[in-house]
Every structure is written in structure tokens, then in C-alpha cells.
Image: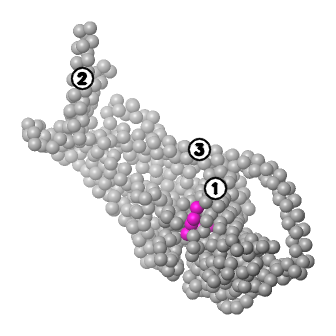
Amino acid sequence: MNKNTLTGLALMVLVMIGFSTYENYARRNQAEEIRVLDSIANVEAKKEAKLEKKKQEKLAAEATDTLNPLFEARQGTAGTTIIENELLKVTLTNKGGQLQKVELKDEAYKSRQGGHVVLFDAKDQNMRMMLDGKTSNIVTDELYFQPTDIKKNGVTMHLPVGKGSIDIIYSLKPNAYLLDMDVKANGLEGFFPSKTNSMQLEWTEDMKQQEKGYDFENRYSTITYRDVDGDTHELSASGGNTEEDEFEEKIKWITYKTQFFSQILIAEQPLEVSAMSSEYLNEGSGYLKTYKTTMTADFDTKGLKPTSFHLYLGPNKFSTLKENEELLNAGDDLDLQSLVYMGWPIIKWINRFFFLYAFDFLTGLGLNMGIVLVLLTLIVKFLVFPLMKKSYIASANMRVLRPKMEEINAKYPKKEDAMLKQQEVMKFYSEYGVSPMGGCLPMLIQMPIWIALFNFIPNYIEMRGQSFLWADDLSTYDDIINWGFHIWGIGDHLSLFCILWCLSTVFNSVITQRQQSYAMTDEQQQQMKMMKWMTYLMPLIFFFSFNSYSAGLNWYYFISGLVSIIMMWFLRKTTDDTELLSKLERRHAERKASAGDKKKTSSIMERLQAMQEKQMEILKQQQERNNQK
């Protein structure tokens, strides 16, 4: 158990070191990447400026052409129209007939400044539609719409095109985060070529930084989409300065997602995506990334059928996403809940069918979120206590048998007798019915729970804005000290919850090492010295990795470590070594008495012993052949 357990811990440490090194290396190189990209961007900007100048000259010429079917649409001044329901306040601009600002009215979601959360504002977002005409092309963000049929929860944006028009009809669903958007042609049969049956959409947005931790929020911000086969994909959640892809794929929906909020464009008919990109924006700019997607949608130029979309503009809350999806009556499973990331399949099942219900039940009692995490820790520890006890007893068995193991080591002091010593050790383990790996499996079974909460807590929106003790928001780091500038490996702050967790991990390591040292022979202790120091190094790795993580996650791990210490103390106090040794001796006598029973099923150690004996026999035969030669 000891060697395998420490080997597992060593591998965990190496993974954490590798991850931390890679993350810091990427962060150091980001500045250089941005500098190179900026120089390239300057060249591109000059080219775009020339193209823009030609474009403006063309628009100016068209604006004075009274015979142009878009002449009226090019004349106008910018104005706004507001529609709202119980949960959303949406501001639309007549320049482009599109959304200009979206504000969440639910008091549960506050911005860092204390007001309502604003998903985007003013020039943050642009969704333009492009249609090819016979003589003129419609590019909506260059044209002025006329708001008509204005209601509290809906409006029609009317674009005059010659004797016809393009209408974009917006309507908010009652008590939901859903905005319906229908695009329809009226009387434009002669404006479009006969082959035109689609329109192009270009959706660009600078994603606002909603949370305190730039790096942590960026980690969970990405473009997500679901294809027509029912598979959900992400462009990239982290990586270099820019992530992009060019492909031809039909999708049901696409999401511009941050850690706790999403904007989902859901199409009645599949969209064909041609390009998608995500570019990091500088920390301190107030934004995370720039998302851009180019896609094609079906469009009926005769106006018999509108092109219909639905926009979800709201929180990444599992139950809310599910409720809003049911309102769409889509007929197939859109699986919007997958936007609440819960980890890989096995981990996802643990979160989906246990922790989600456990959190919802406990928060439903009106308890502070910090207390909820304490109660959840106690529930989890109660459930895994039998495994922990089994692991402890396996280690205790090795401890009480240590004097006998020392006798075997003394019997074979020479290195050339290592195989004989190993064979006798295996026989010894088999006779007493113990295994050095006996405590490993119970501990490994607990790892999925540790990983499950690592994925769940940072994405549980109910944690957002919840204060506890000195932390004003458990969804982000608790900076008891903030010096205002970045230090490599630490950042610009110290998280007290992270420090407490690391200290509890150190104490746990000390207790575990002491417990294991009692079970090891002197020779084994000498061999495991390096592994021992690696387990002490792990809390330091945790500190550098988790200093910017969610305070709620660090608080949970701290309480979990504290409870583990108490449980280990309890097991040590309630375990009688004399009684345990007597039990092992009785088992030893019973096994020797039944050694001749062939029907008895062999244990793992017995099979290992048999393999060792066979290996020894082969070695002896080889030595005899070598002596004969």
C-alpha cells in the first residue's frame, strides 16, 4: 500500500507541476504573442483602412442615388427602442435593427458594481445579416430600420427596400430568458436573384468580464455549439492568444459563453458555420475575449416563411436552462444544460445525479453557502468513511506485522538474496491475508469525488455573490491581501482559504507519513525518503495553482482536510493494535489449517506467491544450465 499510494501521490504532484509550469509559460509568452500580433495587426489595419475608405466612398455615392432601392434605408439617425419582460430588459438600435444592450433584471444576479448584470452594451456586440441583391447588397448594420408595432415585450424593425421591405420581428417570452427573432422579406421578389435562398450572419462580440478573477473566468469562457448529430463541442476554453477554426458544419445552436452567463443563438433550421474564432483581450480592459462567427441561414426571398431564431440571454443555471429549453418545444433534445460544465462522463454523472441535487436541497433550506459547503463535506465524508476505514485498517495491519517483516529482512541481508526475500515476503502476506495494496483502491475510489467537486463548484452559479466570513464572493478568490501588481506564480493577491487548505494538506501529509512509517520496515523507509518529501511539496504546488481559484472550492477542500484529520485521529484512537494482531494470527492459523483444501479460492497474494515461486524455479533452471556450460 505504502509504495503504491506514494507513487500515486508522486504522479499527482508531477501532473500539477507540469500543469502549473505550462500555465505560467503560456502566460509569459502571451505578452510576446500579443506584441507580434499587434505588429501584424498594424499592417492589416492599414489594408482595412484603405478598403474601408473605398467602401465609404461607395456608400456615399449610393446614399445620393435616389433610384437605389436602399436610398431610404441609408438615411436616418441612430435611435433606440426598449422591450422587456419580468427577467430581461433589451435595448434595440434602429442602426442595423439589432440588439444594443441586454440587462438581467433578476435581483439574484448583480454586477461587480452592484447593479444589474449587463451582458453587452453599446458597441460590444454586432450581429449583421448580409443578403445579395441584383443591384445592391443588404448589409443590415449599415442601414437604418424603422421601429413599428412597438409593444412592451416586442417590436418590429422595418427596413424599407424599394417598394418592399425586410422585417425583423422581436418578441420576448413571458417570464423567460428567451427572445424570439423572425427575419422576413416582404414584396422583394424582384430585388433578389432567383438563385438566392440564404443569408449570411456575422456575429461578433467583445465578452465583458463579469467576475473579479480575469484568469479564472477566462478559463470557463468559450464558444460552444451543438451540431445536427446531437454532439456538443467547444472551440477552446484556454490556450494561445487566438483560437480559430474554418469548417463547414451544420449546427442547431451556438453559444457565446462566460463562466456564469450565456448568449445562445438557436436556429429553427440548421445553421451552416464557415468560420469561428476566439481572441484573448488584455487583462484590465474590462473584457475577456472577442468571439466571432460567420454562418449561413436559409432565407425565403418570397417571404412565404420567415427565418426564425431564438436567443437565450441569461445565467448558466442548470434548472433555468432546462426550463427555457422546454418553452421552445423544439421537438428534439437541445441539451442546453450541457453549458453548465460538470466534467468528463463518470465525473459528470456524479455531479449531475448527486451533487446537483445535494446542493439544490441544501441551498433550498436558506442556509449560507459556506454552511452548505460544510454540510456537504460532512455528507461526503460520511459516505466515504467505510472506504477510509478500510484503507486505515489495511495500513494498520502492515503496522502490527512490521516486527515480523523486520525478521524476514534480517534473514536475507544480501542483495543477491533479494528474490528469495521477495518470495518469502509474498508468502508471508498470503499466510496472513494482507496486501500492501489493500488501502490503495479505497483511496482511489475517492478521487472521482475530489475531481467532481473541482469541476462542479466553480460552475455552480448559486455560489456567485455569496459572502462567507471574510470572502465577499465564494465563486472567486478571497484576496485578504492585494498588492495591485502581478507576481509570477502567485498573481496580485493572497487567498486565505487557499492558505488554510494547504496547511490542512500539510498536516494530513504529516499524519499519513507517520502512519505509513509505522507500517514500513527501516529499509522501506530509507527507500521512500524522496517520495516523502514529494508529498510535502504537493501543498506548495496546490498553493501556486489554487491561489486564484474559487474561494468556495478552497473552503470545501480545507474543511474536507480538517475532517480527514479528525477521522484519522478517531480511527487511531479506536483501533486496538493488540486485538488487530490477534485477529491476524487467528487468520494465519486458519489459513495454514486449510492449506490442503484445493477447493479454496486463491487470494491475490496467493497467486502472486505462485508466480514468484514459478519465476524462482525458472531462474534456478537457468543457473543450472549456465553451470553445466
Q: Quick one: label 1 or label 2, which is nearer the N terminus? A: 1
The amino acid pointed to by label 1 is Asp
Which kind of residue does numbered mark 2 sit on? Ile
Which of these two is toward me, 430 or 243? 243
Quadrant for residue 136, please give it. Answer: bottom right
Mark 3 is on which residue type?
Thr
- Colour style of the rendered protein structure: one colour
- What residue appears at the point 58 percent right and 85 percent down from the top-left corner? 173
Q: Residue at x 17, y 41 (%)?
A: 602
Tell me the element at label 3: helix
Name which residue lies at 37% across and 50% down. 444
Q: Report which residue position mark 3 lands on.
A: 21
The verdict on residue 250 being magenta is: yes
Give SS at disc 2: helix
Quick one: label 3, few (<14), some, or many (20+) residues within 10 Å? some
Horizontal relation, residue 419 to residue 33: left or right: left
Q: Main secondary structure of the magenta part?
A: strand
Q: Quadrant of the N terminus?
A: top left
Q: Which residues are magenta?
A: 249-256
